[in-house]
Amino acid sequence: MMTGKVPSFSPGSTVSSTLPGYVVLCLALQVHRLASAQFTVAGPDHPVIASLGGEAILPCHLSPRMSAENMEVRWFRSQFSAVVHLYRDGQDQYGQQIPEYRERTELLRDHITNGSVSLRIRNVRLSDDGQYKCFFQSSVSYEDAILELQVAGQ
C-alpha cells in the first residue's frame, strides 16, 4: 500500500549514498564500451582487377589502426556461412571453407598487428568475379567492408 511519502535524499540515506556510485559505474561502463567497440573496416574504394588464372590481392584494414590478432577475420561472398577464408583463434580455419576456394586462398597477415590483412586468391577463375565482404569481429563489436573483384580476360 502506498502511503504517499517521498523517499528521503538526506546525506547518509541509502538512496543518496548509492545513487552517485551507480551513476559513476554507468558512465564508466559506457565510456569503456565506446572506447573498446569503435572501429570501422575499410577496403579499396575501387574494384580490384585480377587476370584470369593469375592471383588477386584483396586488401582490408581496421580504422583506427589496432591489432586484429585476437579477432575473427572472415571473408565471404553473399552468405556469411559460405566462407571464402576464415581466421580465428590466431590461425586459419579451413573446416568451413567452401570447396570453390579450397587450397586457393591465403590470409596475408604481415601487418595484422596494425589491423591490416589481405586475402590472396590464387588461380583466379571467372566465378571469382564479384563482391566480397571482409568481416572483423572483436570480443565486443563487429564490422565489415564490401570489396569488388573484377576478373580481366573474360
Image (cartoon, rainbow, N blue to C red):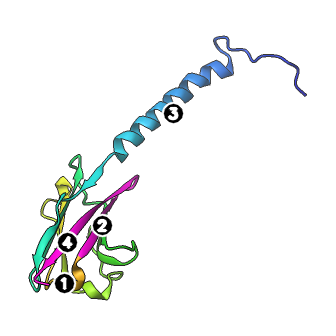
Q: Secondary structure at mark 1?
A: loop
Discs 2, 4 touching: Cβ within 8 Å: no
Identify the magenta region.
130-154
How far apart, in angstroms, are the residues tagged by discs 3 and 2?
Answer: 35 Å
Three-letter amino acid code of the residue under disc 1: Arg
Q: Residue at horizontal 27%, vertical 70%?
A: 132
Which disc is residue 104 wearing? 1
Q: Residue 149 shows which numbered tag?
A: 4
Q: Amino acid at mark 3?
A: Cys
Mark nearest the camera among 2 and 1 is 2
> Which of the marked residues, 4 or 3, is nearer the chain's N terminus?
3
Density class for disc 1 (Cα within 10 Å; few <14, some 14-19, many ≥20) is some
Q: Which mark is residue 10?
A: none
CB atoms of marks 3 and 2 within 8 Å: no
| Residue bearing mark 2 | 133
Taking 104 as reference, is 31 left or right?
right
Q: Nearer the viewer, mark 2 or mark 4?
A: 4
The residue indicated by pointer 3 is 26
